[in-house]
Amino acid sequence: MAEQELDSMSLSELRLLSAFLAMETTDTLLCLARECGGGKVTEKVQSFIWDHCLTKAVGKGYESYSKKFLKKLITEIESNHGNVLDELYEQYASYMISFKDDNPVRENERVCKCISFLFPDCFKLSICPKSRKLVVPLQCSLNMLEGDTGCSVWPSSLFLSEFILSYPHIFSRKSCFEVGSGVGLVGICLAHVKASKVILSDGDLSTLANMKLNLEKNRLNTETNLSETSIENQNVVKCIHLPWESASEKELQNFMPEIILGADVIYDPSCLPHLVKVLAILLNKKKSYIDNWEGSILNSFPGDGKVNDTHDLDASSFTAQRINTSEVKGIINDAVDLVSRADPVTYIASVIRNADTFDRFLALADQADLRIKDLTSTLRPFDLLPYMKSYDRSSIRLFTVT
């Protein structure tokens, strides 16, 4: 979309368009449409929806999505005794004829969503587009379990992406490695802030194939050959197949990144020993760090270990706070402290769905001599997805592992 077209939109219109492209729920779209019209869906708002959403929607899944939205939109307008534009009636009739209810988008099919990061006016860094909007098209699955959960967009990957875009100086000119990269959103954001190396990994081959497609959709070159020459090419994003349980110390030591990232990787108790092993190797610069790992860690599952510098890890007591401009200076100072680190560091964004599982992770990390710190309340990202009502930022925690 042309920048001058975006510039002419109001913030409420931009949020409505962004929500439509991200396939937010129809209730969210209706709420944003009312905001555009000052409390009701006016004819001007209908014209905007027709001109900018319905007539320009492309990509798999949008027909079914648009049909559901149009049905609710027309019902909303009629129930409030408003006038529905003829174009909307005609488009809905077209959907009824060409896209019947007996042929819906199935749960296991993939669609193309566009995630739009909307930068606030106070955001003055060079990574911010002139349009103040970064749009990332992603092919993803409506089935949250497809690709071993890797083909769906998860809240923690949205949070970690906001974090990268909010503090680009942490990641710029740094070699970055993501464990469990899913749809590739975090990697795309790392490339946008000009990380010197971006290596994305996943243990599921179908997820890896989908991730490579998404990188190509975002005009990023992909590479699977990890030769010494190609790994130094800053214009290439590496994609590697890396099941945690079979990852060797020698294989991991070929990477030695400065920053490791993970989004929602603390969820399966059986995978935690392997995850901790991978993190411990990547974080340690010395050779032969994981001696006798199978005997000491992989066969143990403690439940009551504690880790120093990990505070208030009860998810029920956590509430995220919205950032305001008066806090930006102090938070950026915290970020500068992180940039000055000489040793590798891991950033993990996670929803704590099961306290026992998280306690196991903490105990295993303690045995591996890893130090965990909760940065959730001290280093909050900007809210770059204000239109995304389905995204609950307050449930996500941000940790460093060193």
Image: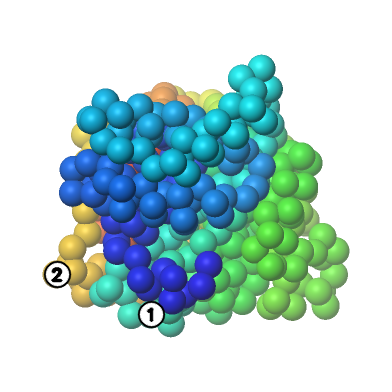
Whether residue 183 can be seen here: no
Position of residue 69 measured from the top left corner of the image (x, y, whole percent):
45, 34
**Looking at the rendered structure, which numbered label has been put on residue 326?**
2
Label 2 residue SS: helix
**Looking at the rendered structure, which numbered label has been put on residue 295?**
none
Q: What amino acid is labelled 2 in the image?
A: Ser
Tell me how far mark 1 sits from mark 2, CA to CA: 17 Å
Q: Is residue 299 left or right of residue 36?
A: right
Position of residue 258 measured from the top left corner of the image (x, y, whole percent):
56, 68
**Looking at the rendered structure, which numbered label has been put on residue 125?**
1
Taking 306 as reference, is 211 above or below it? below
Position of residue 78 measured from the top left corner of the image (x, y, whole percent):
30, 29
Which of 12 and 54 lies nearest the eye of the viewer?
A: 54
Residue at 38% over, 32% down: 74
Residue at 76% over, 64% down: 222
Q: In this view, does 288 lie to the left or right of 130?
A: right
Whether residue 10 can be seen here: yes
Position of residue 148 measured from the top left corner of the image (x, y, whole percent):
66, 32
Find residue 228 and report its image quarter.
bottom right
Q: In this view, does 343 lie to the left or right of 391?
A: right
